[in-house]
Image (cartoon, rainbow, N blue to C red):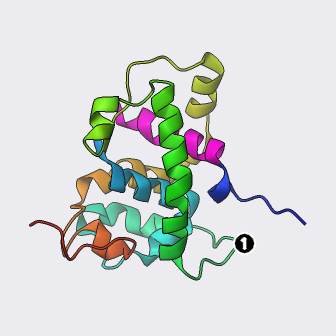
Amino acid sequence: MLIYHPLFDANHCVFRSLLLLEEQGSNEIDIDLFRMMDFYLLFPSLLKNISPFPSELKEFKKSIRNIDAPYENIYNPNRVFLELRRIQSIALHHLLSKQLIDMKSFNNGKVKRTSEMLPQELEIELNNSPIKKNTWFSLISEGFLKVEFNGSKGLKKRTGLMEYRYDEN
């Protein structure tokens, strides 16, 4: 029996990446933060596990309590996050090949959308995506950018998904 999950679908990852990039305009995002944002787009119920929850995002705290539990149990989010990295790399390189991500930014460890136009059908799908109507999407696409990412008070530590102890202060 074959079971589909968007976690292992590079095309789904491209779509999620474009959803995030379209919200950012011409802003650069650290690639590790971008990967984390994509992870939480896949598993928004895991937003509840961010501890301590950033005070900068307290307006979102009530709304994430209402996120339904998924049908699958994620027993080891760190492992899933690491497995997702391979698919994310494929997706980002695909976007680079289509010149939808700035190569210079990417080489500097950042992700930035270029001014390259998307096909009209894709742009319509991105604009009408039901994911964008969720409060948790705003938390991920906008809120995460307001919180320190590195260090002992950053998102890396709060999520437990990445090593933070060796970050520069």
The 10 Å Cα crowd at callout 1, few under 14, some 14 to 19, many 20 or more, is: few
Task: Tell me if residue 11 is in the magenta stretch.
Answer: yes
Number of callouts = 1
Q: Mark 1 points at which residue?
A: 71
Residue 39 visible in the shown view: yes
Quarter holding the C terminus? bottom left
Q: In this view, does 24 lie above or below 122?
A: below
Residue 55 x, y percent position in the rendering: 24, 69
Quarter holding residue 119: top right
Q: What residue type is labelled 1?
A: Tyr
Residue visible at 50% across and 33% down in the picture: 95
Magenta stretch encompasses residue 13 = yes
The answer to whether residue 41 of the structure is visible from this angle is no
Image spot of residue 121 (x, y percent): 66, 21
Magenta stretch: give its range. Answer: 10-27
List x then y, in percent, for residue 112.
Answer: 34, 34
**Left or right: 100 as drawn, with respect to 160:** right
**Going 30% across and 69% down the picture, which residue do you hit?**
156
If the image is split into quadrants, where does the N terminus sit? bottom right
Q: 113 or 57, which is in the foreground?
A: 113
Report x, y in % for residue 38: 48, 53
- Secondary structure at badge 1 equals loop
Dominant secondary structure, magenta = helix
